[in-house]
Amino acid sequence: MTISQVKRTAKESLRGNWGIAIGIFVLAWLILTVTGGILGWIPFVGQVAMILVTGPLYTGVAWVYLAISRGEQPDVAYMFSGFKEFGRTFVAYLLICIFTFLWSLLLIVPGIIKTYSYSQTFFILRDNPNISPLDAITESRHMMNGHKGRLFGLSLTFLLWYLIPIAVAIVGSVIVFSGAATSSYYSTDPSQVISTISAGAAFGGLVLILASWLITLGISLYVYPYLITSGAVFYDDLFAASEGTFTEETVIVADEEVDPFGTTEADPFVEDTHPEGFGPSTAKEPEVPEVPETPVTPETPETPEVPETPESPEAPENPEAPKDENEPK
C-alpha cells in the first residue's frame, strides 16, 4: 500500500469507532500523567514503577488500535490486556528502551532509525502469543528491512499537524515582543518601560503556553488514534506482503499457524477425508469435447533448383623448357 492508501484504510476503520479510539487515548494519557505525577517524587523507585506501568499499558493501547484496524470491536478493558501478559510486554518494552538508548549514544539518527526497526514488536506479540520478547524484536527488525523510510514518511504526515501550534506560538511571540518594544520606544519613564516589558512578557508567555497546550491537545485527540491505527494497517500490509513471518517456534502464514517441525492436521473438507454424503461434492462436471481443428493443407514443396554446371577448370600452361647453355647464339 502507498501512504495515502494506508491512511485511507485507517480512516475507514475508525469510522464509527472514533469514540472508543479517543477515549482510549485520553484514559491512557490520564493514567500516565497521574501516575508520573505521583511516582515522580520517589527517586529511582518512581522511575522503575513508571516503566513497569508504561510497557504493558502502551502494549494494550497498541492492541486496541490493531483490533480497530481489523474491524473488531474492542472495549475499554482491552487496553489493560497487556498486564495479563505482563512478563512479555514489560520485557519487550524494557529491551526496546535499552537498545534504543544504546544506539542513541552513537548519534541521534541511529536511535531514530532503530525506533522504526522495533516499531512492529507489540503487534507481533499480539499475533503470536508464544513468541519471546527478544524474538519479537528480531522479527520486527526483519519485517522493517527496506520499509523504515516508508513508515517514517507515514509518521511525518501526522507530525506536520503540530506545525500549527508552533506557528501560533511564533506569531504570538512576535506580537508580544513588538508591543513591548513599541511601548518602550514611546515611553520616557524608565521604570514604566521595565514594568511594561515585564507585564507584557509574563502575560504573553502565559497565554502562549496555554494556547499551545490546548491546540496540541486538540490535535492529539485526532492525530494520535489516527496515527496508531495507520501503523496497525501498515503492519498488516507488511505481513500480507511477506506472506507470513517466521520464528523459531511457529510459522505464521496468512491466518493459519503451522508447526515447521511437525505435520499439519488434515483438513476435514479435503476430498476423501469425510464420509459419503458429507462435505463438498466430488462429482466432476462433464468435460466438453474440444472441436478438432481443421487440418492445414500442406504446402506444395518448391521445385528444387537445378544446380548450375560447374565450369571446367582451365588447363594449366606448359612450363617453358629450360634453355641449353651450350646452344649456339
Image (cartoon, rainbow, N blue to C red):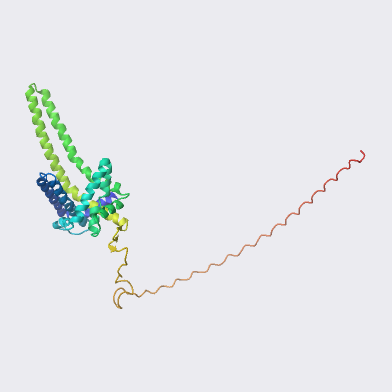
Residue nearest the viewer, comparing 217 with 39? 39
The quarter holding residue 211 reads top left
- Whether 126 is drawn above or below 194: the answer is below
Is 198 situated left or right of 118 in this image? Answer: left
Q: Residue 246 placed where, x, y %?
A: 31, 58
Q: In percent of the image, x 14 and y 51: which residue is there?
A: 28
Looking at the image, the residue that sits furthest to the front is 44
Q: Is residue 165 above or below residue 88?
A: above
Residue 309 or residue 134, whichever sits in front:
134
- Residue 96 visible in rendering: yes
- Picture quarter containing residue 157? top left
Q: Residue at x 22, y 46 (%)?
A: 158
Q: Position of residue 76 (x, y in %)?
A: 14, 56
Quadrant housing the C terminus:
top right
Residue that extends furthest to the right in the rendered view of this protein: 328
Image height of 237 relative to 166, above or below: below
Image position, residue 247 (x, y; %): 29, 58
Place of residue 25 in the rendered image (x, y in percent of width and height, measured from the top left) = 15, 50
In-image side of 179 versus 104 (left or right): left
Q: Nearer the viewer, residue 89 or 209?
A: 89
- Tell me if I can see residue 63 in this picture: no
Give the number of marks: 0
Q: Nearer the viewer, residue 105 or 143?
A: 105
